[in-house]
Amino acid sequence: MWEELLAKTDDLYPEMVAWRRHMHQNPELSYQEKETSSFIVRQLESMGIHAQTGVGGYGVTATIASGRPGPTVALRADMDALPIQDGKAVDYASRVPGVMHACGHDGHTAGLLGAAKLLNGMRSELNGNVKLIFQPAEEVAPGGASAMIRDGALDGVDAIYGVHLWTPLAAGTVATRAGAMMASVDDFDIEIRGKGGHGGMPHETVDTLLVGAHLAVNLQTVVSRSLNPVKPGVVTVAALQSGNSYNVIPDTALLKGTVRTFDPDSRALARRRIEDILSHTCAMFGAEYRLTYKVGYPPVVNHPAETERVVQAARLMLGAEAVKEAEPTMPAEDFSYYLEKVPGCFLFVGAGGAGAEYPHHHPLFDIREEAIGQAMLVLCAAAIGRLNGFPD
Ligand code: NI
């Protein structure tokens, strides 16, 4: 069974690359994945797998049932692209102006389609079922995961696994960790209102640019003076917009930023401190404010027993030396919502190397395509290991 997996992945590889390149040429933004969703359904149907559509928007689910008793394992891939102009000079570059698969989600979907074909072919040997979850809208909160869960995507599911192709890691290696692996993300908009006036007569104004500048500095103390130093956190003020002339004191300032943490206490504390600092800084200058705090994805927290299984699967398929312990990382992922409901594990599959040197969300981003096969192998092996057990 396990040797068969490696051989069949090689057979499926050209098809997975063709699927990935088709999606790469035809990317769709979050919440608009209509054609991608139809493409997935067509491929599943050509394999003889019946798909449920319209799950949490353009989400697609399908169950590979063995007909034998056992647990149900879910495998998840996301499918959305980003508002980035593709800058690559390759024949599979995006054909859609301003839209690009710059995070590798096309590879995730191609890999899960490969897994579908492979597992469907060996379904009579499985002790239980595999549920495929093709998720839209990972990149933009509230995200497709929570919508799919609301529509029942996890009903009857006992464990879930998912991957992210990852160019900071070399192709051929994978990384995961038990516990917190990716951060929570909350974003904030702050609007400060003061009293505009003549740049030469500041005493008659409430200068919102100055309030904004103080805020940008004061907010640095959330991490440096309020969060426990052994618990990681980030507060980034990423935008400060106010004024546009030499001699006019502006009456508004707008700030935008993001908050990343790994645990609920730090997350709540950061929010409370931002509110305190905002109200007191504005009071200091007599300015008014409005805060819009957008609660985003929770942290990705892997379950130890499932992580152990994924590590075992990866070692079996790619060799012990290919498996590394992941560093916790500050980007967020809505895979976290699945992990809040059922035990599971998320892992990074290395996709970096020659031709794939750029970071995620970069206009020249690309992946080493062999990583799609490696992602598929690890997902299939983890699912089979969960259903049938691993060889001794
Ligand atoms: Ni991504």
Image: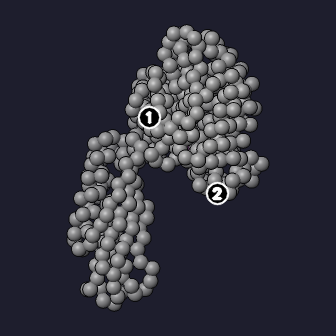
Tag 2, which secondary structure? Answer: loop
Point out residue 160 in the picture as x, y percentages from the top left corner. 49, 27
Point out residue 323 in the picture as x, y percentages from the top left corner. 54, 29
> Few, some or many C-alpha atoms within 10 Å of disc 1 (few <14, some 14-19, many ≥20)?
few
Q: Is residue 245 left or right of residue 268?
A: right
The residue to which callout 2 is attached is 98
Q: Amino acid at mark 2?
A: Gly
Which is in the foreground here, disc 2 or disc 1? 1
Q: Amino acid at mark 1?
A: Arg
Name the residue rendered at 71%, 36% in the picture.
19
Name the residue rendered at 59%, 40% in the picture.
79
Point out residue 15 in the picture as x, y percentages from the top left corner. 74, 31
Whether disc 1's CB lies below 8 Å from ligand 1 is answered no
The residue to which callout 1 is attached is 150
Q: Earlier in the sequence, mark 2 or mark 1?
A: 2
**Vertical order, 176 against 103 (above or below):** above
Q: Which color mode does the image show?
A: one colour
> Few, some or many C-alpha atoms within 10 Å of disc 2 (few <14, some 14-19, many ≥20)?
some
**Vertical order, 95 against 318 (above or below):** below
